[in-house]
Image (cartoon, helix red, strand yellow):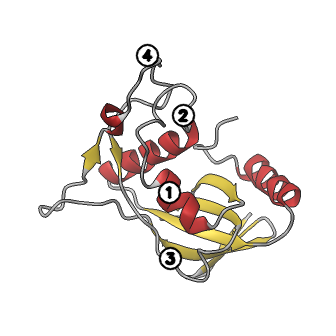
Amino acid sequence: MIASNAARIVLDDLEFRLVCPITLDTDQGGEIVEYCPSSRYKNTGNLPLHEFGKEPFCHFKIPSDPLTKTIGIYALVEVGGQVKYIGETGDSLVDRFNGGYGRISPRNPFKGGQQTNCHINKRLLESAKSGRSIELWFHPTDVPKGERKANEKRLIRSLRPPWNLE
């Protein structure tokens, strides 16, 4: 169940706060900046790209503030209400997004790299290119990792976000 007001939503029984819309970097003409980081990776093992490694990717950042410097469960929600992705972070939210999803490292597109980072970055790029806006919502919590993971899994089972891979 999703209940909301302007700055808060409730997903099942957890209250999430709006962090920000995800705004991709654009050039001076307003076009989304796309990039291909894999060309900077010395692929000495001749690794193939993984399932989500096909480029291009995008850049974005979320704000660093007291809320985003904490751990918890996050939701990517399309404006209008559809939950697209649920995740949890044991690092700060700002580190998870700015150092993971928002800037794909040269190693990540290859087998053994961070597939989830590439997958979510590509989904955000596709959404922006098709005119859909995505917002980041956050449920800060310092409960033990096992409990955070259990809540994340419960939300995924309940809400069935299309970007979460089974």
Q: Which is more N-terminal, label 1 or label 2?
A: 1
- The residue closer to the viewer here, 143 or 120, is 143
- Residue at disc 3, secondary structure: loop
Query: 10 Å neighbourhood of mark 3: few (<14), some, or many (≥20)?
Result: some
| Amino acid at dot 3 | Ser
- The residue closer to the viewer here, 11 or 21, is 21
Of the two numbered discs 4 and 2 in the rendering, the one whose residue sits closer to the viewer: 4
CB of mark 4 within 8 Å of CB of mark 1? no
Mark pair 4, 3: CA separation = 37 Å
Residue 35 relative to residue 166: left or right: left
Query: 10 Å neighbourhood of mark 2: few (<14), some, or many (≥20)?
Result: some
Query: 10 Å neighbourhood of mark 4: few (<14), some, or many (≥20)?
Result: few
Disc number for residue 46: 4
Q: Which residue is mark 3?
A: 64
Mark pair 3, 2: CA separation = 26 Å
Mark pair 2, 1: CA separation = 14 Å
Mark pair 1, 3: CA separation = 12 Å
Q: Which is more N-terminal, label 3 or label 1?
A: 3
- Residue at disc 1, secondary structure: helix
Tell me the residue at 74%/63% (across/down). 1
Q: Which is more N-terminal, label 3 or label 4?
A: 4
Q: Which residue is mark 2?
A: 113
Q: Which residue is mark 1?
A: 99
Q: Which is more N-terminal, label 2 or label 3?
A: 3
